[in-house]
Amino acid sequence: MENVVLKQGRELCGYIIKEITQLETIDSIMVQLEHIKTKTKHIHILNKDKENTFGVFFRTVPTDSSGVAHILEHTVLCGSKKFNVRDPFFSMIKRSLSTFMNAFTASDWTMYPFSTQNQKDYYNLMDVYLDAAFFPKIDELSFKQEGHRVEILENKDKTVELEYKGVVYNEMKGAMSSPGQVMGRSLLCALYPDTTYRNNSGGEPSQIPKLTWENLKDFHTRYYHPSNSYFYTYGNLPLEKTLSFINEKVLNQFDLLDINSKVPSQPRWDTPKQTTQAYAYSDQQDISKKYQACVAWLTCDIKDSFEILVLTVLEQILLGNAASPLRKALIESTLGSALSDSTGFDPDNRDTLFACGLKDISKDCVQKVEDIIFSTIHEIADKGIEQSLIDSAIHQIEFHRKEITNTPYPFGIKLLLSFASTVIHDGDPVSCINIDDDLDKLKENIKKGGFLENKLRQYFLENPHRVLFTLEPDTGLEQKEIEETKKELITLLKQMTEQDLEQIKKDAETLEALQEKEEDVSVLPTLDLADVPSEIEIIKPDTIKNVRFSTCYDKATSGIFYFTCPVGAGSIPPDLFSLVPFFCQSFTNSGTKKNSYDKIAELMDLYTGGVSISAFSGSYFSKEAAPHSFLAVQGKALDRNVEKLFDLIKEFIEDYSFQDFDRLKSLLLQYRAGMEASIVSTGHRYAISLASRHLSKASYINELWHGIAQYQLIKEITEQFNTSDNKNKVLETLSKNLIRMAQSVLKKGNFKPAVIGGSGSIIRADKLFKSIHDDLLNDSQQSSLPSAFFTPDISFKEDLPYDGWYTNTSVSFVGQSFKTVRITHEDSPGLAVISKILRSLFLHREIREKGGAYGGFAIYNTEEGIFSFGSYRDPHIARTLDVYKKACDFIINGDYSQTDVKEAILQVCSEIDKPETPGPSAMKAFYRDITKLDDDIRQHFKDSLLRLDKKRIQTIAKKYFTIKDAQKGTAVISSKTKLEEANKQLNAEKKQLNLFKI
């Protein structure tokens, strides 16, 4: 902790301490400082966490949709004054043990954060980040690579045409293929027509080519100055040393600059508005119910922490769970499948917003959706909000304040993101964490009666600054945009002289030469293998007196108790195995014999942090490698609510029902809508799952449960709802099947519970769950626990796919997979290192820098022994498949150094040693035991990893990367047009992707 005494008003390393505040809920202290010379703000959160975090962020206020803030975020990371190399950011990923490294562009700020557990690494990364942000090169070629450029395409008939390229250009083409992204961006434009939020800070593909290099440099000069910057640090490293470092490296080189970058409040309207926005949708047969409608309101100022809390509570009351009246009214209307994209309270803009609506509706239902929203809110305001809804909303806020996790980001990063927008608009960061005073004030106001009901009137019923927004599918839009881009490029080509064309060719050649050039990156700081701890973290179960049934972990979990329990899935009938994920969805969300689904949802939010069940399938890590399948029941609650948690778990296990057909139908439609939205946003994962689905039984089950196969199953079921008779038959059959599945797994001897938290809660929980278990029927067919955890005999094809799958997207996701060896094999650490070498040294250059995709990567799955290539938001297909072939040649030929191998080892170690908070880390340790990943296997893997050298890597590469294409599975997700174009190119190799509609 700190050696220096921190005191308000004290000068420290060129700063003055403005405020010191205890953050009791997270056992930390917040120190707010201001740099005396430049007026830079610095927020430090001091605690015992060894995972230290740094961030610098700027208020960035675009005046158009050219993507200037986003492209600048990319370009400043392409070399700087001190670190004059092409790509210091990606190079540092290789030379670091960071647990998080990234950069973010929001609507009105740009941020550069990282986290690491290593002190040397912390200062190395800070040095690179500071130089990148404040002293970047921003050279023209980097702008063209990351932002946009035109290149010349020569046709077979020797005619030429132009095409747009660029990483951000292609990234945003992919992003704006998603209806959810179009909805979110268009909603901001509709609600904030007079402020920066009307612009797409990420960049509209049609507007990105209008950005010039000079515009980009001007934007940096204007906004990336210390007087417009905010610094953040978190963890146990000394504040004084960090401040001295920042002062010396950056702040002392600048003077105070008066920068007016404040975002004004949006002028309020006197009357509501309506607006419609089209999005590209290619399936003409499936268009009638692909509209979305929502109502969105401008609400309170971001700096008003009390009103933010009020609206957060109202969001939870109205929409937070299946019992929430507005959510329930919308879903039960059966007008659509799920809540619209962008539904909820968004507190991150200068004026906050609240939106709600429905997706998958027909055009004539738009007005009906608005009517339901207003009639429901009117009814709630007039009749009063039920106290149980208020109590559950406040409980959820209390629970999530207490729970400290590193998911999806390290906790220090999550804290920063929780108050960055408030700080950007001169709000108080303390008010975002210490909410007790606001919470007490809210409770007092609620006691007086009518308070929240009046807020419903103020923010929703009587608030004229609102918009009725319609998102409209357009089957011709994608082609129209393609034609407009072509027309624009033809016009541009006509205006060009021979000199212009020569310059484009010269720039392309220069950029390619730069991308191909081997750089000396020794100027960048690095870590050595000596900086890597040789030991793995080992977490063993604890022994607590009177705890006999459950595996227990006595951990400091901030007053939160965690329960997890794998349930063997091997006894589920094979013909029902594909229904397992929906069984999990409906098990805790469709009601029981005792309570309706909405009552259950209400009880869950009132007493727990959630109860769920999830499906897992894989192979045991032991050498036998037998396949396993299980369902994991999970629940968490505050210590005081442990009994209530197990009341719910008991009810789910003993009184499951699956008899509410309307609810089952609703869950199916919501599940389908969620999967459909995820295909374009995470297409690379789906492509790799498809590519690897025939390489092992576990991979096949993974595709069956979590891939396109699962989406198609749910789609097939829901498409049978066309007639009421047919719908009832389908739901009746489904209900019977779900009951059969429950009967097959909920048996004595098929549970292996673990309890995590304080010893008092553990003892109570063990007794409670043992009582539930003892009341279950015996399974006469299963003699021992492990036998229930097998995977049933499910047949699958073993011929490897060469497939193209088409959907609504303007970019591609290219996956390829092949079989190698598993973690217990001596070559396994080498394969993990090869995945990092290929990503860093070859795929990044070929797929991102040259190809213009957002990302290209390699993944080695130690559990299944499968090696995969993938690309994300990729403008190419055939070219990318060729890159994968060349990647195999690259790793075999050894065109890399021992230093490159060392850096890849560092990356693997960074993943192995990624820290977790006590509850989740104990849970991971428990599941390692369940899947037989013992500590000896883990330690042997790391020991072997740290001994690897280039010679060994090449030997391993020659073993596995010389296989023929026929031994690789290939799957591409893209548009039908792009897949057909790719097949024309692949025809030269006498190969054709087999095309399927998703």
Image: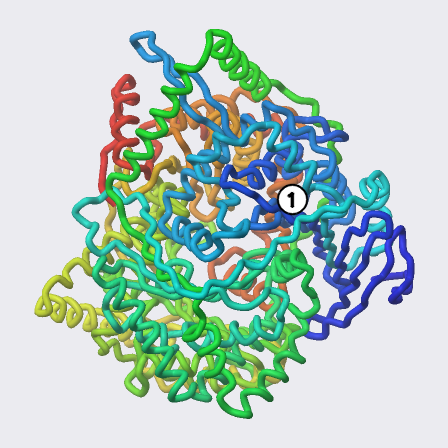
Task: Residue at 57%, 87% (x, y): give it.
Answer: 445
Where is residue 545 drawn, in percent x and y?
61, 84
In front of the other: 545 or 520: 520
Q: How many marks?
A: 1
Q: What residue type is labelled 1?
A: Asp
In front of the other: 338 or 758: 338
Where is residue 261 drawn, in percent x and y?
66, 49
Which quarter shows the N terminus?
A: bottom right
In front of the other: 88 or 652: 88
Where is residue 289 drawn, in percent x and y?
22, 56
In the rendered view, tell whether residue 225 sits above or below residue 11.
above
Which quadrant of the structure image shows residue 652?
bottom left
Q: Does the rendering let one see residue 847?
A: no
Give the secondary structure at mark 1. helix
Where is residue 264 drawn, in percent x and y?
60, 56
In front of the other: 901 or 3: 3
Which quarter shows the C terminus?
A: top left
Which quadrant of the structure image shows residue 123?
top right
Q: Badge 1 is on which residue? A: 943
Task: Residue at 89%, 51% (x, y): give it.
Answer: 14
Which quadrant of the structure image shows residue 130?
top right
Task: Residue at 22%, 78% (x, y): give it.
Answer: 659
Residue farthest toward the front in the current orientation of the protein: 270
Task: Residue at 51%, 85% (x, y): give it.
Answer: 451
